[in-house]
Image (cartoon, rainbow, N blue to C red):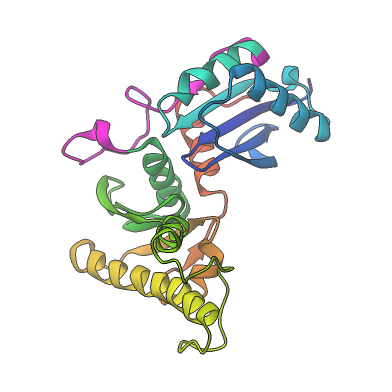
Amino acid sequence: MSEARLLAVDVGNTNVSLGVYEYHGGRGELVHHWRLSTHREQTSDEIGVTLRSLFLQSELTPADLSDVILSSVVPPLAPIWERVCRKLFDRPPLLVGPGIKTGMPVRYENPREVGADRIVNSVAAFELVGGPVIAVDFGTATTFDCVSEKGEYLGGAIFPGIHIAMEALFDRASMLHRVEIARPRSVIGRTTTQSLQSGLLYGYAGLVDAMVDRIRDELGEAGVIATGGLAQRIASETRAIEKVEPFLTLEGLRILFEKNRTAPT
C-alpha cells in the first residue's frame, strides 16, 4: 500500500457519515465520503455488507484502510460498529469518548453529558476558524456549541432540528402537509405551502441570528461556522453564519485521530 488511509465514522441519530482520508505525509486529505441512514436494528453483518459495497464502488478494499476513528451518539450502535471494525479491518476503532485526547478543555459541569459529535465539531471549528467560535450543526437537533478564545469548550444550546419540528407539526395538524424546505416567493406566504416554507426557512434563520446575538453577548465577538444537511440553505438567509463546512464533523474526527496517534506517512 503506497499510502495510509483513515476511515472516519460519525454515527448520528438520523445519518451515519463516513469519510476516507489519504495520507501522503502530514495532514490527511478527504478523498471519499458517504452518508447512510441510521438503523438501530442493523447487525454488524448488515453494516459490513454495506461498507464492502461502498468500498467496491470506490475501488477500495478493507485492507486499504490502516486506521478507523469512530464517534457515536447512539449508544447501542457503538459496540456494533466496533464489531464491524474488528471483522473488516482486524482492529478496533479509536473511539471518541472519555480518555481521548482532544486538546480542548471541557467546561461543562458534567463533561460526560456532552455528545461526542459536539466535541468533534468544536475541535474542528476551533482549528478552522480560531476562537472564540460558535459551531452550528443542523442535524436531528440544531446545536450551538461555543469555544472560547483559548480553545475551551464552554457549552451551548440545543433546539429541535428543522425536520423534527416539521414532522411534529404535520403529525398534530391534519390540514397541513409536508413541503420541500425551499425559499418561497415572499415571507408572507399566499398558499399553505408558501406559508410553511416561509415559517420553516425564515423562522430557523431568525432563530440562528437571535441565538448567535445572545451567545455573543456572553462570549464576545465570535466567528460562526455551520454544518449539517441544511446548513447551506439556512446560512444563505442568516446574517450570522460566516462559513459553511459540510464535512466539519469528519474533519474533527481527522484532527482527533492525528492528536491521538502518529499520523501515517
Residue 9 x, y percent position in the rendering = 56, 32
**Is residue 177 rendered to the left or right of residue 155?**
right
- Residue at 47% over, 58% down: 163
Q: Main secondary structure of the magenta part?
A: loop
- Residue at 47% over, 73% down: 201
Quarter of the C terminus within the rendering: top right
Residue 92 x, y percent position in the rendering = 54, 14
Which sits in the foreground, 126 or 47? 47
Residue 214 x, y percent position in the rendering = 23, 68
**Is residue 2 rendered to the left or right of residue 16?**
right
**Is residue 7 rendered to the left or right of residue 97?**
right
Tell me which corner region of the image, top left, top right, bottom left or bottom right, holds residue 120: top left
- Residue at 51% over, 28% down: 70
Quarter of the N terminus within the rendering: top right
Does residue 102 belong to the magenta stretch?
yes
Q: Could one spot residue 143 in this view of the protein?
A: yes
Does residue 67 belong to the magenta stretch?
no
Which sits in the foreground, 140 or 228? 140
Q: Which residues are magenta?
A: 88-114
**Is residue 206 rendered to the left or right of residue 170?**
left
Q: Is residue 66 above or below residue 109?
A: above
The residue lying furthest to the left in this view is: 109
Q: Could one spot residue 240 in this view of the protein?
A: no
Residue 41 x, y percent position in the rendering = 53, 26
Which sits in the foreground, 202 or 154? 202
Q: Is residue 63 above or below residue 104?
A: above
Q: Is residue 162 above or below residue 108?
A: below
